Amino acid sequence: MALVGCSAPRRLTRLTRSLASVSSKPPNPHSVGPYQVFDRRAKQLQKDRAAVREGGDRSRLVDYVREEVADRMMERVMDIKRKFNTVLDLGSGPGHFSKMLEPDTTSKVVMIDSSEELLNRDPDSEFEVEVQRIHADEEHLLETIPPNSQEAIVSCLSLHWVNDLPGVLIQIREALQPDGVFIGAMFGGETLFELRTALQLAELDREGGISPHVSPMTDTRDISNLLGRAGFTLLTVDIDEIKVAYPSMWELVEDIKDMGEGNAIIGRRHFIPRDTLAAASAIYKALHGSEDGTVPATFQIIWMIGWKPSPTQPKPLERGTGKTSLKDAL
């Protein structure tokens, strides 16, 4: 998908300005708790601003990635032959996934997001089931949702901004009822690798060093281990890719900002010289440009499904109880 952007000089000015976002107070390095990678306050402000820009029209225009992922997530939900009384949508945004729920799947959806503006962007009339919206931090789920209360929890592209991912997965498992299911989708490590390499090469060439502009992300092996450590059973983890074509790097960066997905790493650089950005755009096109003049952007999606343990779940037989040799079967 390609969107028309503004002219190059104006775009340079807007991009340089947009990279300088407000930050919350830096964390105390001597405090006890999970290591802080992301500025959660800055991320909330980014999402709030994206939701109200041009009355929310810009935010709706760049919903295409989340809507595609929500559609693929709905396919996974439909594979579970069960009707849920309630589905909890963690990090819901305006409800990309929740809008796809039908009365045959659930009677009610509970949407939780740290951005109040984004959470309330779209009216209830766009949903087919009852909607409850809760403005709360996704990192502190159990402060809002009681343990053992949810039949199903989904998370559609929000966990990549969580500082304590193992802790959040444990909270999700605690919030589920026995035999409750968690279905999640998050950006993987290959997401926006084209943009990352272009910016790094441009900074090395123009400034002699690099700084992080694309968030650190996890991979499939990490997710499998984390789900197991969090206490989930019957695990399913796989990866998927979505490729989007843009006229140039500028349109990609503008869309990322309008998605509320700007850089929120603690200690991030707030200003990039214009000549570095221009060099990055040229490198992007030289390394990854297509014959039709567009440039691709890759969004890698890690899918995860886990179930809270229950005595009613099927269990593997004990080791040594098999009656047929696998060698003979093959």
Image (cartoon, rainbow, N blue to C red):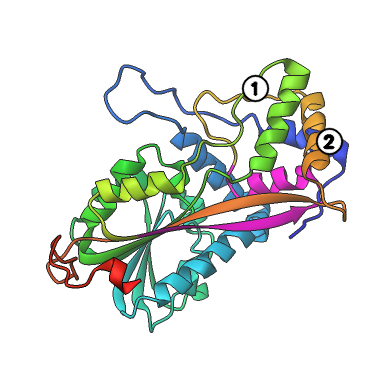
Residue identifier under label 2 = 282
Residue 90 lies in quadrant: bottom left
Whether residue 28 appears in this view of the structure is yes
Identify which residue, 113 or 188, lies in the foreground.
188
Residue identifier under label 1 = 210
Q: CA distance from mark 1 to mark 2?
A: 17 Å
> In the image, what residue occupies the spot 56% across and 30% down?
22
Residue 57 lies in quadrant: bottom right
Identify which residue, 15 or 52, lies in the foreground.
15
Please state if 187 lies on the left or on the right of 330 as rendered.
Answer: right
Whether residue 137 appears in this view of the structure is no
Please state if 148 lies on the left or on the right of 156 as rendered.
Answer: left
Mark nearer the N terminus (1 vs 2): 1
Residue 139 percent across, percent down from the top left: 34, 43
Q: Residue furthest front?
A: 328
Q: Which residues are magenta?
A: 236-261
The residue type indicated by label 1 comes to Ile
Residue 315 percent across, percent down from the top left: 18, 67
The residue type indicated by label 2 comes to Ala
Q: Residue furthest bottom?
A: 104
Does the segment drawn in magenta span residue 247?
yes
Residue 150 percent across, percent down from the top left: 25, 64
Does the segment drawn in magenta span residue 248?
yes
Q: Quadrant of the C terminus?
A: bottom left
Q: Secondary structure at mark 2?
A: helix
- Mark 2 Cα shell of 10 Å, populated few (<14), some (14-19), many (≥20): some
Identify which residue, 163 or 316, lies in the foreground.
316
